[in-house]
Image (cartoon, rainbow, N blue to C red):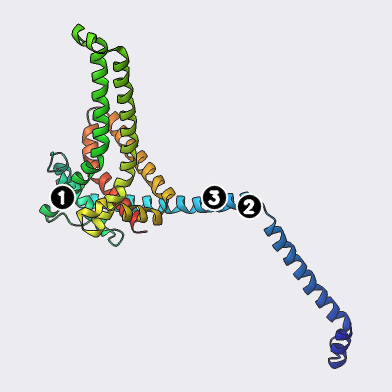
Amino acid sequence: MNRHLCLSRHYPSISVHRVLTTDHKITDSADKLDRVRKASSERDPLLIYLESVIHREGNVALDLSNNLSNSFEYAKKLFSDFGRLVILIILDLIPLVNWIVVGYAARVLRESPGAEAPPKLEKYGELFVDGAKIFVASIIYMLIPLILIGAGVGSFITAAVLEGGPDFMLRQFAPSQALLFGGTGLVLVLVGVVVAFVMLIVLAGGIAHMLKTGHFSKAFAFGEILGKIGKIGWGKYLAWIVLVAIIAAIVGGITGAIPYVGWIISAIIGPALIVFIFRSLGLLYSE
């Protein structure tokens, strides 16, 4: 109160009432701020975590939406050059030669996100080599799963032969041995499928890493690849794989369901679809 009287004595135009009112307002504001801070600190940690997850997932959905929208607009520009599109369609229909189309998509990925339009169709030899690299890398990735699944199928066949084969075989092997082969085959097939699924997930990142770095061996630099996926975010990366797989399945299902001309539509859309996927992967990798 003495402070208020001193103020009014030195500054007559300022009344004690005005000073008191202002002081009370400041005090009330400070009290309200303290209550807000206290309420925030007392909030349920689970609720705070859920809000952060929702916010993060919302950003992921927006980023993927922008990614797919950009890739779709990019792939549409492929139809602006009719001659290039026709050549890509023809090349895509010829086995082995269609590696050129895959190599063209690889060039799209390599130039993303800088380029805003599909590149010129030139230097066919380089495109073929890039397509071959992607094919070989994919085979190497799937080699172990294929061996496991093949061994499992072999065990199934062996079990079937032991169970219902010629009499001389039935006399040499007990039913329990046939069951053992069958069980082993089932386990091998299941493990092979799981490993194949995991390898397919990493394969997309491996191909992007190989093309961006320009070295074939980088397709198998798993530490670098997993580190890059971690920077992108595993949730976003897996969501991208699921979305692209759904889009490809829908396009394939629709064109396959159209009688007579479905294969023609599929041939026309094929190059645009692979360009769309590789453009989208290039954008995702560059984030």
Say which residue label 2 marks.
Answer: 45
- Type of residue at label 2? Pro
What secondary structure is found at the residue carrying circle 2? helix
Q: Is residue 19 left or right of residue 219?
A: right
Residue 156 visible in image: yes
Image spot of residue 159 (x, y percent): 27, 17
Q: Residues within 10 Å of mark 3 (few under 14, many from 20)?
A: few
What secondary structure is found at the residue carrying circle 1? helix
Image spot of residue 142 (x, y percent): 25, 39
- Between 161 and 59, the one lying in front of the other is 161
- Type of residue at label 3? Ile
Q: Nearer the viewer, mark 3 or mark 2?
A: 2
Q: CA distance from mark 1 to mark 3?
A: 47 Å
Query: Which corner quadrant holds the C terminus?
Result: bottom left
Residue 76 visible in image: no
Q: Is residue 10 left or right of residue 279?
A: right
Q: Residues within 10 Å of mark 1 (few under 14, many from 20)?
A: few
- Type of residue at label 1? Gly
Q: In the figure, residue 191 lies in which quadrant?
A: top left
Identify the residue at the far top of this view. 167
Q: Nearer the viewer, mark 1 or mark 2?
A: 2
Say which residue label 3 marks.
Answer: 54
Q: In the figure, residue 111 lies in which quadrant?
A: bottom left
Is label 1 in contact with label 3 (beta carbons under 8 Å)? no
- Tell me, for residue 83, which label it has, or none: 1
Up-down: is 41 above or below 143? below
- In primary-sequence order, the first of circles 1 and 2 is 2
Image spot of residue 249 (x, y percent): 33, 36
Up-down: is 262 above or below 140? above
- In primary-sequence order, the first of circles 3 and 2 is 2
